[in-house]
Amino acid sequence: GRDENHPNVKVLESLHHPITPTFNETRKGLCFEVAKASYTPEELVAMVLNHAKEISGDFGEMPPPRDCVLTVPSFATQHERSALLDSAELANLNVLSLIEENTAAGLQYGMDRIDEEPINVMFYNMGATSTQVSIMTYLSYERKDSKYSKAKTVGGFEVKGKGWDSTLGGDIFSAVLVDYMVEEFNTALNKARGTTDKDVRSNLRAMTKLRIQANKVKQVLSANSDIPVYIDALFDDMPLSTHISRAKFEELSHDLLKRAVVPIQKALDSANMTLADINSIEMIGGGMRVPSLQAEVKKSMGDMTLGMHINSDESMALGAAFHGANVSTSFRVRHVGMADMNPFGIAIELQNLEEAKKKGIFGKIFGGNKGDKAKKAETKDDDEKDGEDEEDDDEK
């Protein structure tokens, strides 16, 4: 039901992608127009899943997998999760479970941990399009004896709080470099041609070259102080020739760096914790490799050492694979306790009940941040409620 004005959709315009979604009146949702054909997001995701199936089959030298576990971001709504399940069905995949990205990384991190005392670990995850922060408590407990294993001490973890920025990721940092190179090129082009209206943004091929170059610049500046940039015949037979320093990149992304630490406080508020309660922090995701971002996160964490003990790119996939082995009946793996939380409140409303003319509102039952408590749900006859009101008046 989203349209082009939704924040997660409007941010695509700033990324200079050649294709942007449009609202489809028939579907009452967004679609992508490619080569005069319209595709729904579910169809496009199904194509990606089919490609993943082919890669898995070729790599394992076996038939393509039938079962899978899919990761979702912390901010994924129930409608979005249902749409992902529809995509998996289109790709002929049986989804054993959905697991949130940070939770999967936390499972990978705690796979072989048995902590005598509970410790709180923060996971900071900046991917290509979003930033997610989760706080997890790792602990150990005694697992009871069963017919499959003897009683023993096992490790586990519980997700305490979450925070995120669904529109801030590594691609946004690349986009500011694209904008800078566009301004540099347009200034030089109009000066050389004696015009004022020529704009490289009108050429999709040129903009694609700039997006590729921006990613390269960002990666090089992560380990170097500056980089020369040259693209031959970028647009209108004019080359791009400039120099970008790390200091210039940090200047361009100053506002983004301030936004990047906001989810940290949101996660702390969600978990009802302070920085003093956090024992360590783990950095994951490809976007966190920017040195200025790491410095900003470290500063906001009170100069706490940033941990990079798990693979920042593969930890979520590895955790999801381990979770899949746990829920599947084909594997037997070590037990790791896991308790996730739902960041959104869930409400159920019952109306127009025919039996006994009962009607009731459940309200928020569970889930949600900031320690939302469950509310007792009751349904009563109107006569019963009137009787209770009279009793209350007598007591007063």
Image (cartoon, grey):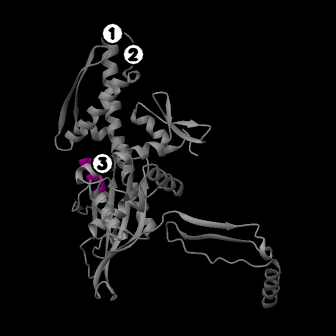
Q: Is there a contact, CB below 8 Å, between mark 1 and mark 3?
A: no
- Location of the C terminus by quadrant is bottom right
- Give the residue displayed 36% in from the left and 61% down from the top: 102
Q: CA distance from mark 1 to mark 3?
A: 38 Å
Magenta stretch, residue numbers:
288-298
Question: Which residue is label 1 attached to?
Answer: 193
- Give the residue displayed 22% in from the left and 39% down from the top: 246
Left or right, 307 with respect to 28, comes to left
Residue type, mark 3 in image: Gly
Residue type, mark 1 in image: Arg
User: Which type of secondary structure does the marked residue at label 1 adopt?
Assistant: helix
Q: Farthest residue in the bottom direction?
A: 395
- Give the residue displayed 43% in from the left and 60% down from the top: 266
User: Which type of secondary structure does the marked residue at label 3 adopt?
Assistant: helix
231 w.r.t. 110: above or below: above
Quarter of the image where one finds residue 268: bottom left
Residue type, mark 2 in image: Lys
At which x and y percent is residue 70? 39, 57
Label 1 vs label 3, nearer the camera: 3
Q: CA distance from mark 2 to mark 3?
A: 33 Å
> Residue 331, labelled with which disc?
none
Q: Is there a contact, CB below 8 Å, between mark 2 and mark 1?
A: yes
Q: Farthest residue in the left direction?
A: 224
- Front-most of residues 57 and 232: 57
Quarter of the image where one finds residue 206: top left
